[in-house]
Image: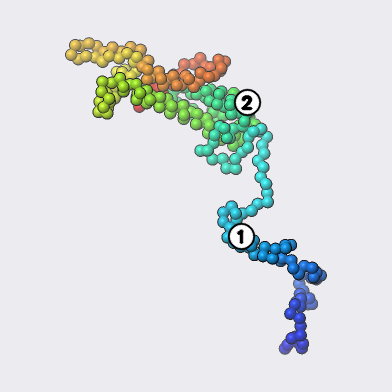
Amino acid sequence: GLVPGWEKRASHEDFSDGDDDVNGPSAPHNDDDDDESVRGISDNEGEHEERAGLSENAKGPAARQSLAIVKPTTSVPGYVPPETLKKALIRVNKHLPLDLRQPFVEVFTPLLIQLYGTEQPWSFDLSSDRIMEFFHRHFASHHPFSSTTDGRKIILKLAEDVLTTWRNKIGQVTIDYMENTLICELDDSSPEYISAWCHWALSGSFKCRPFYYRTFIDADDITGQAAVKTNIFCHPIIACALGHHLGRINILPDHLKEETWPTGALIMAVQSVSA
């Protein structure tokens, strides 16, 4: 039944006292704490409600708070690794250490072009190990950077960009020459005539292609005059394409220039004209 006098018990009585106490004795009551916020010390009566509202409505980065301050560190001076290294965004002036940026552009880039310019395009060895071995051979002092996972990834991506740009530029040079010079020399600049001329120039074997020769006069069936062909692979359009390659490696100091002929670059120049 009801305990006699129950209605006289204070409404603020602590029910943790007595036999029902499972948490141990309660802390002594302090009257000075009556006005303090339940969530912490504060003199702003509505502060905890405001914070609760912000937490409920926060989205994205505002919903996540961190007390940690991240300071990227590295043993390589001038290099700060990004949080997420995206291959497509890797750039020389952003991801290489400061003391490697200029040597990479002025030395490693032409060295790499020179190396592949002496090899046959269809047998290029573009393996990661070969490129890294080539880098270490010429830049051994930067091994602390290139030996890291991010460093290797950065160098390989930039080397890939160098070779891709080099090959694309050889093709673009031939297109520019054809548009600005070769077509202007034709008897007719109409699209139909240009198409017919290109079809004729590409017909037959490679020995019959006029754009391979410095001088080319086609045979005359009426007079029986034989074709005149001199200076194979010396047409200006090929010279322009090959000249681009030579210009890229000409900045190398003499002691780094190879004596091997740039046969690969010449083949690429010829192929770019035929394409």
Q: Please indicate whether residue 18 sits to the left or right of residue 93 in the image.
A: right
In the picture of the structure, the residue carrying the numbered disc 2 is 140
> Front-most of 32 and 129?
32
Q: Position of residue 28 (x, y in %)?
A: 81, 70
Examine the rendering and report whether any part of residue 21 can be seen: yes
Q: Please indicate whether residue 35 sits to the left or right of residue 157 in the image.
A: right
In the picture of the structure, the residue carrying the numbered disc 1 is 54
Evaluate if marks 1 and 2 touch, with contact meaning CB atoms under 8 Å apart.
no
Examine the rendering and report whether any part of residue 199 can be seen: no
Dividing the picture into quadrants, the one containing residue 60 is bottom right
Q: Position of residue 77 (x, y in %)?
A: 66, 32
**What number of labels is visible?**
2
Query: Looking at numbered disc 1 in the image, what kind of residue is underneath it?
Result: Leu
Q: Position of residue 167 (x, y in %)?
A: 44, 27
Query: Which mark lies nearer to you, 1 or 2?
Result: 1
Q: Secondary structure at mark 1?
A: helix
Mark number displayed over residue 249: none
Q: Residue at x 54, y 36 (%)?
A: 90
The quadrant the N terminus occupies is: bottom right
